[in-house]
Image (cartoon, grey):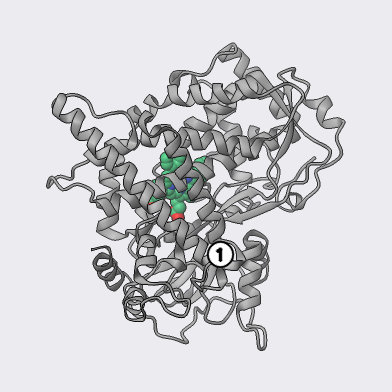
Amino acid sequence: MVAELSRERSERIEPTPRPARLPTAPGPDPVPLLGAIPHLLRFGRDSIGTAGRLFERYGPLASIVRAPARIMSPRGISCVVANGPALNREVLTQHERYRMYALPGTYFPEASDLARARTRGGTRGRPSEDRLRPIQRTLTGLFHVNGDEHRRHRRLLQPAFNKTRIDAYRDDMVALTQRMLDEWREGEERDVHADMTELTLRIATKTLFGEDAGERGVALARMMQHWLITMFSPGMLLRLDLKGLPYSRWLDLTRSIDDETAALLRDKREAVARRASSDPHGPIAADMLSMLVAARDEDGSALDEDELVGHVGVIFGAGHETSTNALAWTLFLLAEHPEAANELDAELAGVLHGDPPTVEQLAKLPFLDAVVKESMRVLPPVPLHPRVVAEDTELGGHFLPANTELFLSIFHMHHDPALFTNPDRFDPMRWSKIKPSVYEYNPFSAGPRMCIGAAFATMEIKIALAMLLQRFRVERTRATRVDRRVAITLAPKHGLTMRIRRADGAWVSARRSLPDVRGNIREIVELP
Ligand code: HEM
């Protein structure tokens, strides 16, 4: 059934590519003998730096290379980068024309791949149909659907993300943050990026699966994390399903994730059915998965198993790594900007008096709000939003053939001096003077595909920061080097080691006693 769906979708969504038609957007020529490869590798290694150089040289819509190329979309034929509010608005509001693709990207098998695999039977290192099939639902979810189908799925998922539902997760967020902070000790060095990963993972597990999934949910989340990291490793270029090779290990992992998600889903369905039969008019359990299992469209239809497995993967995959990075970068930026950190401490103490914030109090912390907004402006957790062009089109005065891959650079828009004064500077105070539109500032994207978890993430980040900073101060260590890594999300490449101090307000003297930050993070954000 998945194969049928996939065939239907791909036939409906993407016309057959006609080779040798390239976007007219200017860009560098391919390298003799090596063609597009060096350009694609450069973009893969450092998408932010490469896109910046392309914008500088060729303008706001540039080809990554003037040659056939693909990066993420299974049918991609060429790749462009785009920058600026006008292009942003045009792309994000034309949902039918600029489409999304499943997170496994070029590894997502098309119907033709499956048919080929069926006839070949998995010989000579080529994966069998059985090996490819789990990719079709693992981490595909909302990213895999477009047009009316996307609208239907958003309708079914939306109730699980409504404000009252999200507010109800506040107690879990507080309890899990408290648990993490109880383990921290004054004076110790910790990788706070790893800590934030653990925290957001536990929050995602609890809110998505509920009490009953417990450690199973955490184990699944770890597999997904490993799956994403493997997917972006250079070894995946060799697409041979031979034991020991990264691609083969990734296929094994895909199968394990698929099996475990399906098993959790089965248990959840049974729990939902038991609850409904014992109390037919009672409320649905508070976890998201129970909501998704019980969700019904106007015509009474529900999400089927393939769809649910895909949604669980995407909600999990999209939902914790992003918040992790937002939290870790905010801690880093506060430690480097002691005046802002002091101001935040004062606001938290004045409103919360050492307690965790209630939902109502979160609305009374304007400087915390400004700090979080400014952190996601300077270092957006998702710096580029990918799309694929569904039909021949014109954008920014250039022709883009169908199946052009397009990367909207939110990072460069957030660093545009025409939109933000001293754009590379972390300055939370600016938010008392500016009110950018959603097409000028959009860490959560905009339009019909805007992040469904934006309210959840904002609450999670604010609660964690408010609780953490009332108990502790964090300080970069002398040895800490901060480099950036972009694999969909913008993360500190080597983690983020910091020393934990009690909340003594000594941000200024601590920063003064340290040498300047080392690492290529300095290229994208101005640091004192
Ligand atoms: C700081 C944290 C987060 C950031 C910066 C973020 C960012 C984004 C962005 C930029 C998109 C849209 C990409 C595009 O237009 O191409 C997106 C989509 C999405 N996000 Fe988030 N996200 C965050 C947290 C979360 C959380 C906590 C959840 C779930 C609990 C979540 C679930 C999703 C889903 C399901 C989509 C797909 C929406 C669709 O295609 O209709 N995100 N996110």
Of the pair 317 and 243, the residue shown nearer to us:
243
Q: Quadrant of residue 265?
A: top left
Using residue 267 as the reference point, say whether residue 279 is left or right of it. Answer: left
Of the pair 417 and 10, the residue shown nearer to us:
10
Horizontal and vertical percent position of residue 98: 39, 64
Q: Looking at the image, which residue is at 43% across and 21% down?
A: 171
Horizontal and vertical percent position of residue 257: 42, 51
Using residue 278 as the reference point, say whether residue 375 is left or right of it. Answer: right
> Is residue 132 positioned above or below 124 on the image?
above
In this rendering, the count of numbered labels is 1
Cβ at disc 1 under 8 Å from ligand 1: no
Q: Quadrant of residue 43?
A: bottom right
Q: Residues within 10 Å of mark 1 (few under 14, many from 20)?
A: many
Q: Residue furthest top?
A: 353
Q: Looking at the image, which residue is at 64% across and 74% down?
A: 39
> Is residue 119 positioned above or below 386 on the image?
below
Q: Amino acid at mark 1?
A: Pro
Q: Secondary structure at mark 1?
A: helix
The answer to whether residue 438 is visible is: no
Horizontal and vertical percent position of residue 322: 53, 44
Q: Quadrant of residue 217?
A: top left
Screen quadrant of the C terminus = top right
Using residue 302 as the reference point, say whether residue 320 is left or right of it. Answer: right
Residue at the spot of label 1: 246
Q: Looking at the image, which residue is at 55% across and 30% down?
A: 369
Of the pair 514 and 259, the residue shown nearer to us:
259
The answer to whether residue 418 is visible is: yes
Screen quadrant of the N terminus = bottom left
Horizontal and vertical percent position of residue 506: 78, 21
Of the pair 10 and 365, the residue shown nearer to us:
10
